[in-house]
Amino acid sequence: MKSPLEISHFENYKFYLPLIFLPFWLLLYIYLDSISNYFVYEILGMAKGIHITESIRFFIYEVPKVLLLLVLIVFVVGIIRSFFSPEKTRKVLEGKPLLIGNIMASGLGIVTPFCSCSAIPLFLGFVESGIPLGVTFSFLIAAPMINEIAVVLLFGLFGWKTALIYVSTGLVISIFSGWLIGKLKLEKYVADWVYQTKSGNIEIEGQIISFSERIETGYTAVREIVSKVWIYIVVGIGVGAAAHGYVPEDFMVSVMGKDAWYSVPLAVLIGIPLYSNAAGIIPVVQVLIEKGASLGTSLAFMMAVIGLSLPETIILKKVLKLPLIFIFIGIVASGIMTVGFLFNMIM
């Protein structure tokens, strides 16, 4: 059993560890391109300019780059999330008017822990607290669509402008969709038993969390999230690497280029029934854009896959009637297509 002194030293070690590793992280990230080139061209001795070489180099460079970014951002966001909880989120949103509530709910959805499996408990808790249905939907749309994994991958693979576009348009979709659902007064399409349910709300008031404990939540977030998504990143980048080396550009331009009027609705229709997280789909989208797919069509496809998750929709069937589910899908899909058409026009 560790003594209090040993525990104190261990806590200090965990506190200073990020500061020790940050310089190494920066050096590795800065020189990763040179390291990848040396490994592929010098150690493996592969010739430049051929398909297999380009695919392997793409894979060897992108996988560590994305994982490096993911570890750093997930750690930071994990600390930020320690200041939020579903219960605190509900309290913040209680009593807010519709549009203000939609804006706040969408913003909170980005930083609040969320997954498809928590859709029903969150939905029940929000409804029980008197939060309007439209505000609840703004949260449920924003939380899975705009998360740190999506932002990290978009920033790492496309740059900050595309990441900012994605976050901004995702927020607009979640705010507008929730606002419209609220205006349509669709409460009658919520399962009858939902409004009769009273779940216990237990929260320790005045609980103070030390900064070392918040650091620990960052470590926990890295362990839990990275361990779950790394395989999707590797597979997604692997598929992207194959397409990067072998898919002809003319084919992608004809199907997903901005001149193909049907490309945006087709991308959304294909994306809605698919299921993948940001880690799996964004590396594929990167290659689609490189091969000639337009940014608007690619964003629409990505948002449809991530934002209209099939498992989440199936889970919500337990608390929503079919008309509301179809209205929800229709409104969000329309918003996504609008974003796709808009960016195809201006970019």
Image: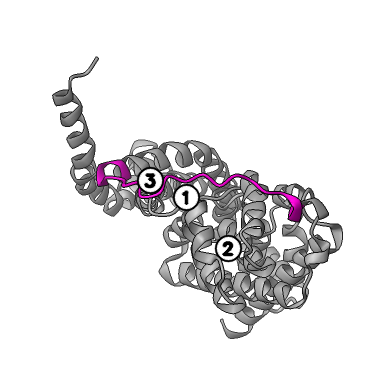
Give percent across and percent down for residue 37: 35, 48
Please, what secondary structure does the residue beneath circle 1 have?
helix
The residue positioned 43% from the left and 62% from the top of the image is 155
Q: Which region of the structure is painted magenta?
A: 194-214
Q: Which is nearer the eye, 124 or 45?
A: 124
Q: Is residue 203 highlighted in magenta?
A: yes
Give percent across and percent down for residue 288: 61, 61
Residue placed under numbered mark 3 in the picture:
71
**In the figure, is residue 113 to the left or right of 42?**
right
Please, what secondary structure does the residue beneath circle 2 have?
helix
- Indicate the quadrant where residue 339 lies: bottom right
- Indicate the quadrant where residue 39 lies: top left
In this view, 104 is above or below 113: below
- Quadrant showing the N terminus: top left
Indicate which label's residue lies in the foreground, 1 or 2: 2
**In whole angstroms, how far apart are the C-alphas of marks 1 and 2?**
31 Å
Q: Which tag, 1 or 2, sits closer to the chain's start?
A: 1
Q: Is residue 248 highlighted in magenta?
A: no
Indicate which label's residue lies in the foreground, 3 or 1: 3
Residue placed under numbered mark 2 in the picture:
142
Q: Which tag, 3 or 1, sits closer to the chain's start?
A: 1
Give percent across and percent down for residue 4: 17, 24
Q: What residue type is labelled 1?
A: Phe
Q: Which residue lies furthest to the bottom in this view?
A: 346
In this view, 220 is above or below 31: above
